[in-house]
Image: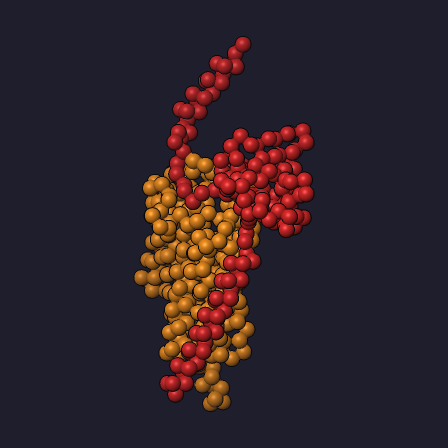
Amino acid sequence: MKKRKLKYLLAGGIVVAALAGMIYSGVQESMVYFYTPSELVQKKDAVQGKSLRVGGMVVERSIRWDPQTLLLTFQLTDGQGTVFVRHKGTAPDLFKEGAGAVVEGTWTPEGFFRSSNIMAKHSEEYKPPAHPETLESKKELFKSILKEGKP
Amino acid sequence: MGRGSLATRVLGGTAGLLLAAGLYLGLVVVPPDAVQGDVQRIMYVHVPSIVTAYIAFFVVFCTSILYLWKRDLRFDAVAVSSAEIGVVFTGITLATGMIWGKPTWGVWWTWDARLTLTAILFTIYVGYLMLRAFAEEPLAGARYGAVLAILGFLDIPLNHLAVYWWRTLHQPSSILRPGGPSVASDMLLPLAMNFAGLVLLSTYFLVERVRLERLRHRTAEVRLTRGRRG
């Protein structure tokens, strides 16, 4: 009776381990949530026209925004490769130069990434602002604005 | 039998007081985050909720193993009760996560590994509760449920490591991470208070819910014996 139980346990354990292994390797291969800019640059012909995500750092001084046409352009980098991104519309508040971002869209034959959705990444570090806003600091700001505003 | 003991009521009261103080500290007293501003205060509900859910599912995992081993319905009563608590707090985590995601990431939801595995966790244990509710033969339901609960628990370690193994939009853990918490010390106190409050609250829920489940077992027993005599 005991031996039989052990057999079932062993068989069950093997099935579970196999399942876990399959899920792990399957997820590993097919669940690339975003490509890095250098990966995209490497395989751009293979992925042309397919909808995918690219994630990286927004290059400093690369953001251009035209409020008339709502055209937003910037570059994403991972240090090795850089991708030029065009986006129609606005970006989330935390989207800024030097910060991480993930964009959804397609690689175009013209050699840029057409984004349909921008997502801003943020770090897991949380800390208070260096100069906390107090009532005093707001009064100071208000005064300085009034002074500079005078002709 | 109608109400919980004095000890459990004290437990519930302490949980309420801790949560009230922790929420007041977190939502009003401590400074906002330097990058995100006030919206980051969702962390004081979001993070304690998911850790509480993980603990609740760990209780389900252990008591399900014990039930399969000893076949004692008391273990099963704890398992099914704790699963309900875990589902509630996973739901709160998903909801607060979406509310936090929209103003910071720019989206309510995205299918990255962390979010997907959390949704799967929610589905597994909602499925567990449905299986328990719809089982025609309660003892068979308890057995199959225990197997599902044990296998489903594997999702949790996977989810914890997901942010390190795969690329995700979700940031890595702020508390249980190599090198210690990446949260400023002022912000840690309300986080710890809310966590302690939720653990106490869950314990209170668990004690009361197990008491109800045992009453249910007893009524079923009484019905069975009467049925036999009649």
In this view, the residue in front, A70 or B226, is A70
Q: Is residue B122 visible?
A: no
Farthest residue to the top: give it: A151
**Image position, residue B80 (x, y; %):** 45, 69
Farthest residue to the left: give it: B7
**Image position, residue B177 (x, y; %):** 37, 50
Q: Is residue A64 visible?
A: yes
Chain letter for red, please.
A
Q: Which residue shows up at 64% across the image and 45% down it? A: A107
Relative vertical location of residue A71 with respect to residue B215 in this rendering, above or below: above
Image quarter where the N terminus of chain B lies is bottom left
Relative vertical location of residue B120 with respect to residue A63 in this rendering, above or below: below
Farthest residue to the bottom: give it: B229
Q: Which residue shows up at 56% across the image and 58% down it? A: A30
**Image position, residue B53 (x, y; %):** 43, 58
In this view, the residue in front, B203 or A6, is A6
